[in-house]
Image (cartoon, grey):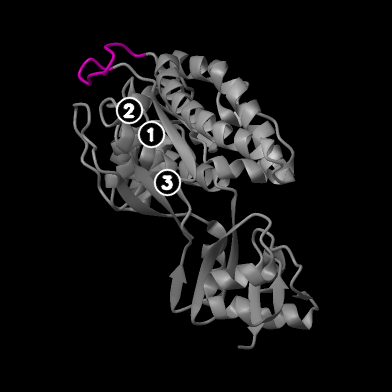
Amino acid sequence: MALKCGIVGLPNVGKSTLFNCLSSAKAQSANFPFCTIEPNIGVITVPDPRLIKLAEIDKPKKVIPTTIEIVDIAGLVKGASKGEGLGNQFLGNIRETDAILHVLRCFENDNITHVDGSVNPVRDKEILDIELQLKDLETIENRIDKLEKQAKHGSDHKTKRMYEIALKYKSVLEKGLSARTVKLDEEDTKLAREFFLLTNKPVMYVCNVDEASAKTGNKFVEAVKESVKDENAEMLVIAAATEADIAELETYEEKQMFLDELGLDEPGVNKLIHHAYHLLNLKTYFTTGPDESRAWTFTQGTKAPQAAGIIHSDFERGFIRAEVIKYDDYVTLGSEHACRNAGKIAIEGKDYVVQDGDIMHFRFNV
């Protein structure tokens, strides 16, 4: 799928270090602002123990996990909304992403320069928020002018409704709040997507801490937590430099020993990937057999024909039915044949909404 998360933040907060931990694509990482200019794009494997279990059962020739894209975007400075620094490019790159991972520096280190001279993650968050809000306000004011003219000339219901939604957005943006704080019903939410507002994208605040704070957090993390409590946003604590050290270790045993010493049950990047997956409203279904066990990404609420189309467009075009086995049944009974004999294969039609963990087999005819 083409959905992707963008890593954003001020210069020198650890974005590129985090990106390098996440992806096989390596971004340049150095102690000076604007180290990243062109966005780096990496394809990240989504860890899923269910796929490993299916592979243990079927012993396929190939095991293919699902992936998401992540983009390391250049650091932002004050005035980006007016084109300062790499502002226009930065905002354009954010607009192309589906969700935002906002990295905040939550550690002190005299050897790593902070662009504003001191560590204050709440201030840093507000700098980025303000720039995105100003750009959104400009977008909304332009749309309001056009929608108002159309509404006055007896335009359709949709135009009038979008005009009313735009006014709601303008009101909150003028108060220094993000568009995502506006509460809309399902129908209006769909209409609002046509505005392509930066502050309407789902966001996760990633608190980049030192190794000592990886498990318990620190005063900076607590300040961020208080700052975002009223937002519809997620938050995660991670020690990017430590994660970089873990990523360099060659064996699973070495990595596990390192994690044990830190009192952590899994690498922070694994949690980050799962959070990003959730942020994008993504789920996973599986296909499995002697040739291949594979995870497939779909958006929550996807119906069977569209899920089939993720594999190949012909599957959707000629969709007849889906044969569905629940993951727990497959693991318990140990094979598709056993599930079939036990009556654990459901035959589903075009209206079936695919569930996370479903094992699917599609019947089609083109």
Kind of residue indicated by mark 3: Glu
Task: Tell me the distance, in whole angstroms, between the alpha carbons under discs 3 and 1.
Answer: 13 Å
Quarter assignment of residue 77: top left
Q: How many callouts does the rendering have?
A: 3
Q: Residue furthest right?
A: 343
> In the rendered image, which residue does mark 1 sit on?
8
What's the magenta region? 109-119
User: Which disc is residue 76 wearing?
Assistant: 2
Q: Give the overall secondary structure of the magenta segment.
A: loop
Nearest the camera: 7 or 338?
7
Q: Residues within 10 Å of mark 2 (few under 14, many from 20)?
A: many
Classify mark 1: helix, strand or loop.
Answer: strand
For the residue marked with disc 1, what is the amino acid? Val
In the depicted view, which residue is nearer to us: 32 or 94?
94
Residues at discs 2 and 1 in contact (Cβ within 8 Å): yes
N-terminal label among 3 and 1: 1
Which element carries disc 2, helix, strand or loop? loop
- Which numbered marker is on residue 96? 3
Q: Residue 308: image x %, image y %?
A: 61, 73
- Residue plotted at (48% across, 25% down): 133
Tell me if residue 111 is in the magenta stretch. yes
